[in-house]
Amino acid sequence: MANVTVQGFQKFYGSLEVIPPLDLEIRTGEFVVLVGPSGSGKSTLLRMIAGLEKIDAGTVSIDGEDITGRDPGDRDMAMVFQSYALYPHMTVAENMTFALRMRGTGDAVIRERLAEALRMLSLEGYENRKPAQLSGGQRQRVAMGRAIVRQPRVFLFDEPLSNLDAKLRARTRLELRELHDRLGATSIFVTHDQIEAMTMADRIVLLDRGRIQQIGSPREIYEKPRNRFVASFIGSPEINLLEGGLHVDGDTMLFNGLTLPGRKMEMPTGSEYTLGIRPEAFDVAPEPLAGTVPLAIRAVEYTGSDVFVFGTIDAGPLTVKLPAEGHALRDGIGAGAFIHVRPTAEGWHLFDRSGLRVANT
Amino acid sequence: MTLRLGSRILANTVVWGYALVILGPTLWVLSNAFKFKIDIITGATISPFTWINFNELLFSRQSDFLANLLNSAVIGIASTAIVIVVATMAAFTLTCLDVRPWVRWALLGWALLFHMLPTLTFVGSWYLMFSSVGLHGTYFAVIMTHAVHNLPMALFLMMSFVGALPRELIQAARMDGCSYGQVFWRIAFPLVRGGMIAATALTFIFSWSDFAISLTLTSRDTMTVPVAIATFAQEYDIRYGEMAAGTLLSIIPALLLILLGQNFIVRGLLAGAVK
């Protein structure tokens, strides 16, 4: 059991408010990812929960027990740092058992937990090495081991994968998530990488300038972004955002000449809106179809599995994603050519002037 | 290539010239340690070899050189120990704990200013202070003033070492259940040991070679080596030979320390310069 409740968290640097009052509830066994651009306050929030950063207002509690005033070491939380922060003068085994030794845990228990963690992380045989004699991936695992042997109520991760190369990162991502499931622990994970957030999280907390923009499952966040910021932060390549006015012609909704298929909405027309369409949410044809607009191709990127087409329609620049295989269009496209596109029925979002999503189908 | 050769010749000339300026007089003094007085006074370069100066220095009744060496050692070791302990702890507090920046800068600025003023500005007041409480001529007076005088330099050196400790390391130790005291002893202390050796070597050498403070604050019983060497220059008789022998003997401990701490000193002075 480890419900983490954050209530009214607030943080100032001088007179600058970096975390405006913020509430957050993390349920037992959940893997929650705090994600946002740099300066969004995600690391600060994590460090406030850990007790490493002074809290100017608010409380944090585990299972209803207020731990706001407690020392970081007395919160029963373990943290994995971005730099791993291994003690360079201690061996792997000493690093991993340091917290237990500090707490006066018995030798037998320490040995047993160490052996278990070493096995779990495939670090057997490295017990007596110093951190300097390990590779980056191994150091990262030692840092995880240091957290695991403590069997804490809550795991905190501060961008622990960002120092790994891309391949190792993808593999470690999976291992970390499996480890979480096996331990049944509550985990809070900070990253600026949306792929990490999407792939690992039960729930994503998306932050910008200290404010929670949206909390939800990766699918909710991707498919129903609450506002423009969320829509553009999640998804790669970025969602297409077009500025313009909306008007209704009979049963059809038109946005700067672009037909928006799907259910018609009762919305004030004419005002300024932002239309968001994900690159994959287009019907594409070599010839004009009902509701399509011509897209003048500027550049084409081939990634192996996909083809990204960058071009322009009357309403503005557009990125369209096509599957590389089995698409009738793939040979006919290139800079200077035209294809014809229309948004799919489920694939568009409308944001009002304040950035809030007002509707989609 | 020619330019590189040219600049190498220039660099070598400068370095060797500088070495000559330093080493020349030193070698001259040291060679005097093994000459008879008459040869020193006549300026003979090649002269008969003798141990007489060392004999006079160490065993004659007019000289207390062994006691002086002991005094220097006691004062040097004690003041260095105080300086290193205080400087390391202060550096840890100033860099790792939540000290307000202005407190840090005020303290460092004051220490630097204090270090920039000539020592002679202070010795007068120190003499009066210690005399008025009856502590003049005691080990305590010299040890404390040496500690005070050398603390700023050691503090600066230790701050660069402690400041190089990654912050996350300290936070990790905090998460692992260490109080700040335990963070200091278990994490910071073992990792800045190299810096402490460098600071120790420098502080000890400063204390060992200090003249101004020791001259003012020591008595016959607590006289240190540099002061003792100076007493060989008397009104009607300057005992060059004994002075040279004393100088030679006094260089040895400092030289040993330099050799021992050399690597650490260079690393210490350059700490933080390059990432």
Image (tube, coloured by chain):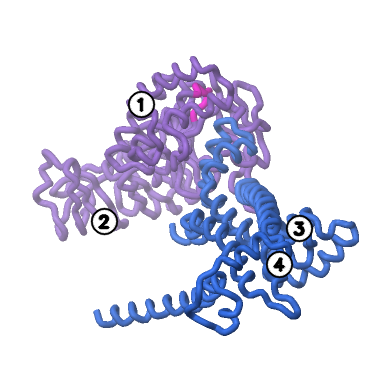
Chain colours: A purple, B blue
Cα distance, mark 2 to mark 4?
91 Å
Magenta-highlighted residues: A150-155
Apparent side of residue B226 relative to residue B141 in the rendered image (left or right): left
Q: Nearer the viewer, residue B213 or A263?
A: B213
Apparent side of residue B135 relative to residue A285 in the rendered image (left or right): right
Residue A233 position within the rendered picture, expressed as x and y whole percent measured from the top left: 40, 45
For residue A316, which quarter of the picture?
bottom left
Residue A68 position within the rendered picture, expressed as x and y whole percent measured from the top left: 65, 32
Residue at left 53%, top 60%? B255
Please tell me whether mark 1 sits on a helix, a strand or a loop.
Answer: loop
Please tell me whether mark 2 sits on a helix, a strand or a loop.
Answer: strand
Q: Is residue A358 magenta?
A: no
Residue that numbered label 4 is attached to: B227
Residue A313: give its label.
2
Q: Is residue A152 magenta?
A: yes
Residue that numbered label 1 is attached to: A121
Residue that numbered label 3 is attached to: B222
Upstream in sequence: badge 4 or badge 3: 3
Residue at left 33%, top 48%? A238
Q: Nearer the viewer, mark 1 or mark 2?
A: 1
Cα distance, mark 4 to mark 3?
10 Å
Q: Are marks 1 and 4 in contact (CB under 8 Å)?
A: no
Q: Nearer the viewer, mark 2 or mark 4?
A: 4
Cα distance, mark 1 to mark 4?
65 Å
